[in-house]
Image (cartoon, helix red, strand yellow):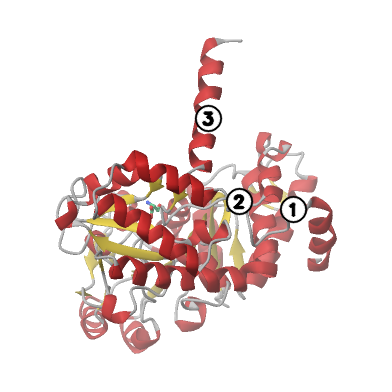
Amino acid sequence: MNDDIAFIEEQVDRHHDWFSKSLPMIASENVISPLAREMLLSDFGDRYAEGLPGERYYQGNVFVDEVERRVVALAEKLYRCRHADVRPISGTVANLAVYYALLEPGDIMTSVALSHGAHISSAKFGAAGMRAVNNVNYPFDIDRMNIDVDGTAKLLRDVRPKVAAFGQSVFLFPTPLKDLRDAFQEAGCSVWYDGAHVMGLIAGGQFQDPLREGADVITGSTHKTLPGPQHGILLSDSADEKFVKRLQKGVFPGVVSNHHLHAMAALGITLAEHLEFGRDYAAQIVKNAKALGGALASRGFTVLAEKHGFTESHALAVDVASLGGGAAVSLAFEKANIITNKNLLPWDTSSVKPSGVRVGTQELTRLGMREVQMAEVAELMARVAIKKEAPERVAADVAELRKDFSTVHFCFQSGVEAHKRLRLFG
Ligand code: DSN
C-alpha cells in the first residue's frame, strides 16, 4: 500500500472512531442519513451539468435532469414556494449569487454585525466586500440577542438600502420581519434572509416562516438543522419572473459553473425525508436546546438570554469568560470529546480569544437524544469547565453516554422502506 494513502485512510478511521465516542455539538453541523450518504458515492459526483435541466451545455444529463427537477419540486413543496434553486454548492455560494443578482458595487446593504452573530459572508472582509457593497449594521438588543426593532426600522428608513439582509450564525431568536414590513416598503428594498442555521427548523414549522413574513429570497446551507449534504439552496416565493430570473442568473452563470450533482441528489433524499420526519425532528431540536440551556444555567454556566428562555432555535450562546474564555474552554471540551466552538459574543472584539462558546442540539437530537440526555450532557460540560475535572476522565463518561446513541434518527432506516415511501412523493 502506498504510504500516503495508508496515512490518509488511517486518519479518517481515527476520526470516525473519535466521533463515535464524542458529543458533536457544533451548531452548523449534522450527519446525513444512510440513504443520502449513498448518493454521495454515486457517479453523479463524476459528472458535469451547467445551466438548468433541459437546457444544459453538456450531454449525459438525461437522468441528472430528472433528479434535479424532482429535487427542485421537493424543495418547493417543503418550503411552500414558487422557486427553488438547488445548484449553489454551499450556503456562502448561495449568498454570493444574491450579491451578484441584487447588488452592484457601492449599493447599500443593511445586515447584522459579525459580533452580533452574523455570518462572515455578510462582512466587508468576506463576500460582501468582494461585491464592494456599502454595508451598514443594525442596532442590536443584547438582552434579547436580537436586532432592535425600532432602531432597525429607523435605520431602514434613513439609509434606504437596496437590500436588507438578515440571518445569523448565532441565531437564537426569530428575526422580527413582520414588525419591519412597513419599513421595508418605505425603504423600497429587497429582503434577503440567510436561513442557513435554521433551514430544518423553518421546514419543520419551528422558529419562523420568512417567506410568509416578508422575505423575498432565502439562502441557506443544507447541512445544519436541515440534516443534508454539505450544499446550498436558494428559495423565493416571488411572482415577479424578472426577479427570479436575476436570482437564477446569479447562480449560473454568476457564481456556479458545474454544480455538485451527487450532493444535489443527496439533498433530494434529505428533503424527502424531512417532509416525512421534519416536523418531529425540528420540534425535538428546539425542546432539547431549551432543556440544555436550563440544565447548563442550573449548573452555574452563564447562558445568554436566560430571561427570554435561552433560545427558540437549536443554538445556545454561553459566556465562559470567567471560566477561562471561549478558546480555553472549547479546547478543554474537545479533550473530553465534547465538540463545540469558541464564539464571539456581542461585546467581544477578538475572534481568536472570544468570551463565548456556541453549542447546538441538532446533531445530538438526530442521534436520538431527548431532554433527559440534555441534563447528562450539561453535567459532563460542567465537570470539565466548572469543576475542572481532568477532561480525559470525563471523556470516558462521554463515550459511555454515546454508546446508546449511534443511529441516525428522523430518516428512513432501511433502503426497502425508503424506496417504498419515497415513491409517495411522485
Ligand atoms: N461558519 C459556519 C458556522 O459555524 O456557523 C457557517 O458557515
Residue 119, position as x, y percentages in the image: 34, 57
Q: Nearer the viewer, mark 1 or mark 3?
A: 3
The image's mark for residue 300 is: none
Marked residue nearer the N-terminal end (1 or 3): 3
| Disc 1 residue crowd, few under 14, some 14–19, many 20+, Cα 10 Å | some
Residue 89, position as x, y percentages in the image: 53, 48
Marked residue nearer the N-terminal end (1 or 2): 2
- Residue matched to label 3: 12
The C terminus, quarter of image? bottom right
> What secondary structure is marked by label 3?
helix
Residue 172, position as x, y percentages in the image: 36, 70
The N terminus, quarter of image? top right
| Disc 3 residue crowd, few under 14, some 14–19, many 20+, Cα 10 Å | few
Residues tagged 1 and 2 counted as in contact (Cβ below 8 A): no
Residues tagged 1 and 3 counted as in contact (Cβ below 8 A): no
> What secondary structure is marked by label 2?
loop
| Residue drawn at x 56%, y 17% as measured from the top left | 5
Q: With respect to residue 366, does 389 lie above or below?
A: above
Measure how far apart labels 3 and 2 are at the Cα level: 17 Å
| Residue drawn at x 29%, y 42% as measured from the top left | 390
The image's mark for residue 32 is: 2
**Amino acid type, callout 1:** Val
Q: Which of the 4 quarters of the picture holds residue 174?
A: bottom left
**Amino acid type, callout 3:** Val
Measure how far apart labels 1 and 2 are at the Cα level: 19 Å
- Residue matched to label 1: 67
Residue 48, position as x, y percentages in the image: 66, 38
Q: Nearer the viewer, mark 1 or mark 2?
A: 2
Q: Relative to 389, is 407 on the left or the right?
A: right
